[in-house]
Image (cartoon, rainbow, N blue to C red):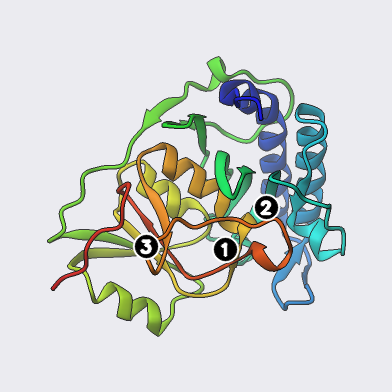
Amino acid sequence: MPAIDHRQLVAALLPAVLTAGTIEMRYYCEGCAVESKADASPVTAADREAEAVLVAAIAAAAPGIPIVAEEEVAAGRMPALGSEFFLVDPLDGTREFIAQRGEFTVNIALVRNGAPVFGIVYAPACDELYVTLAPDVAAMAKVAPREGPVTLDEIGLTPIRTRTPDPKALVALVSRSHATPETEALLAQFTIASRTNAGSSLKFCAIARGAADIYPRMGPTMAWDTAAGHAVLAAAGGSVTTLDGKPLRYGNSMATLCNPNFIAWGTPQPLAPRI
């Protein structure tokens, strides 16, 4: 497989990402009807309209690479996959979107051989963009939703990096909508100085920019929920592992797109629990 030109791919997809954010903010401000999918998760017109824009842009920028998009899959359209494919969640954090909490994101990831090697996460209500610029370089920018041409030079990307955690005073992030007793039991194995409830892929990005150290997820998620944030975190110096300490991988079938329980870390390797 050819090497990924991260900057070129970010530049090609950026206008669509910001346009998707514009669509979502229009519905966010004006309101929209909420439907339930077969798995009982919520979906809105914002999800579908934003996804159409993103899928078209990815297909134009990287023709021939399959695209697994959340709402397309929900409608029964799952492409045949090989070792390389895109994952798209047009509106990660739909519950936060519906509740007007602002913590929702546009997620795009490229997966190769089970690993997320490229990622874009955009939070239009927060004007926050996170991207990978190289396998070991992540960056962020403050950029409001917009439509039309835009360049990387215009938005002023700033490199981000995870911090060195203090094992005696860790900062934890917990899913706002999916907290579980298992999450509490896992966090009890570490010395947590503070914790914050948050939604969507912004939890991965907070660790990537050095604002937190650990995010455990003990409950069902899909690959498109996590792969983009995972890619950004890995490029910033962090990692995402299953509970046995192995790297979280993304399979190329519907069954293997369901994630196991995992922990996102601000370190390349998992931290040791308290003895």
* The furthest residue to the top: 153
Q: Residue at x 51, y 53 (%)?
A: 201
Q: Residue at x 73, y 61 (%)?
A: 253
Q: Return the residue nearer the eye: 116 or 46.
A: 116
Q: CA distance from mark 1 to mark 3?
A: 30 Å
Relative to 199, does residue 128 appear above or below in the rendering?
above
Of mark 1 and mark 2, the one earlier in the sequence is 2
Q: Return the residue nearer the eye: 236 or 212.
A: 236
* Res 92 seen here: no
Which amino acid does the dot numbered 2 rest on?
A: Asp
Q: Nearer the viewer, mark 1 or mark 2?
A: 2
Residue matched to label 1: 96
Residue matched to label 3: 245
Q: Return the residue nearer the eye: 225 or 100.
A: 225
Relative to 220, does residue 85 appear above or below in the rendering?
above
Q: Which mark is residue 177?
A: none
Q: CA distance from mark 2 to mark 3?
A: 26 Å
Looking at the rendered structure, the secondary structure element under dot 2 is strand
Residue 203: x %, y % from top left: 43, 55
* In the image: residue 122, left or right of residue 138: right
* In the image: residue 202, left or right of residue 85: left
The quarter in which the C terminus is drawn is bottom left
Residue 32: x %, y % from top left: 76, 61
User: Callout 1: 10 Å neighbours few (<14), some, many (20+)?
Assistant: some
Q: CA distance from mark 1 to mark 2?
A: 14 Å
User: Callout 2: 10 Å neighbours few (<14), some, many (20+)?
Assistant: many
* The furthest residue to the bottom: 181
Looking at the rendered structure, the secondary structure element under dot 1 is helix
Q: Quadrant of residue 58?
A: top right
Which amino acid does the dot numbered 1 rest on?
A: Glu
